[in-house]
Image (spheres, grey):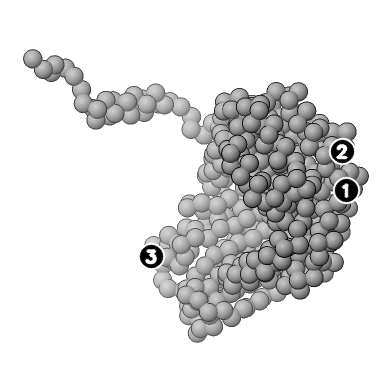
Amino acid sequence: MPDTTSTSPQSNLASSIGSNLLSIQGLDLDQFATLHTSVQGWTTKAGTGVKFIEARGLPIVDVVLRFKAGTTQDTDQSGLAALTLYMLDEGSQRHTAAQHAEHLEHLGAITKKEIGLEHATLSLRSLGNKARLDAALELFIDLAAHPAFPPPALDKIKPQLQRLNASQERQPEVRARSEAFRHLFNGHPYGNYLGSTHQGIAAVTVQDLRRFHQRAYAASNLEMVMVGDLSLSEAQAIAQRISQALPQGWTAAELPPVPVATSATINIEQPGASTAILLALPMDVPANDPEFPRLTLASEVLAGGFESRLMTELRQRRGLTYSVRSTVKPLNAGGVFVVEWEIAPQYAQASQTLVETLLREFIDSGPTQAQLQLARKQLAGDLLRAVAQNQSLASLLTEVTHQRQPDDHLNTYVERISAITPADVRSVMQRRLHLEQKVLVSVGPDVEQQPLPPTDQ
């Protein structure tokens, strides 16, 4: 006889969902989780700054090497920094590029590289098993410390980098950023957003690569981050092993202050179905300045999510764009506050006027308490997601290390943004963001301009 009291999988699922919903009744969803992430920090004998988080949940180790070897370090030969980084995995003094790749694949290890204005980054992800990790580290150190820079590989990579730059320049949003940086940072190393030029790439020689590597990839020019299945003593041994193998004794000088910005409107004609627009304001607020989190919250309220001010006006009420976003980008010698969106070409000018008006009103009035609380939730959620996985935690720790944040930064971040008031945000915007210095760039087809269509609401 069948059991009439049994339940179906669907009813079990419904019961489970109902139980979970009941279990959160009375929970204050405005309260944020507290992080307890222990960051250990030290400096190796060779001068490498190291940050380490022990994470035993998975048998995986992430190692990130961030050298102050970005494109701002090669202003005499624009392209040298990028080519040096891209040539590192083209063979070492012990292994060919194919052998390196084959050995790493056999170990299940992954390496990545990235170039930016201020840094060049190499990362390794490996299983934490001692034998596999040791072998992966050996290959990783060989790649970073003893590159061969074979001339045939340089001849292959040069045209690849030139084609990549040309392709990026054809992307309207990248072209807009490039033009904004060129104007805001005129005469400064930050002014070359892509970080290399066709002529600079063509002129680089193997001897140039070796000289640059010997300086810029020195242990004293490195910030190292480790996250994973390691004890503190094991992490210290790895850090010492890496820093000892690298060139020694050179550290990049601090970049000069950025020039005083002047306002500009730059229109670049380029075929396409839409127009990319960027509004940039100079922002000389370091990431470790106590006022920086207030600007981050301001950016989140302005265009950080679906309920943000600009998204509400441009997408929900007017249907003008799929996305509008704002970014606070701190740099060691300056920074920018950026708003970016794409729109139908005939509304380019009218949308610029609208965004500038809304930004001015926001700076004058500041956020509401409700808007600020929503922004806090979004930033707290981003942080919790980042620390939930070793790889994203390593990337986050690398970023805050580069920003010279204190070791308790991750654990106190939510508490600090929770204490910020609407008046705090309004005050910092009025003192730090100046619309008379704005740079407005549009990249798109030249068409007859029209007024904005009526709102839907």
Compared to residue 245, the image places residue 87 above or below, namely below
Q: Which residue is mark 3?
A: 456
Are discs 3 and 2 less than 8 Å apart at CB? no
Closer to the camera: disc 3 or disc 1? 1
Figure quadrant of residue 110:
top right
Q: Quadrant of residue 283?
A: bottom right
Quarter in which the C terminus is drawn: bottom left
Query: What whole-number distance in Å separates the C-alpha atoms at marks 3 and 2?
Result: 60 Å
Q: Distance of mark 3 from mark 1, alpha carbons?
A: 57 Å
Q: Earlier in the sequence, mark 3 or mark 2?
A: 2
For this rendering, which residue is in front, 388 or 147? 147
Residue linked to disc 1: 251
Q: Are marks 3 and 1 in contact (CB under 8 Å)?
A: no
- Give the image location of residue 339, x and y in percent: 60, 61
Going by the numbered disc 2, the residue's amino acid type is Gly
Q: Residue at 73% of width from left, 28% of height from top?
A: 235
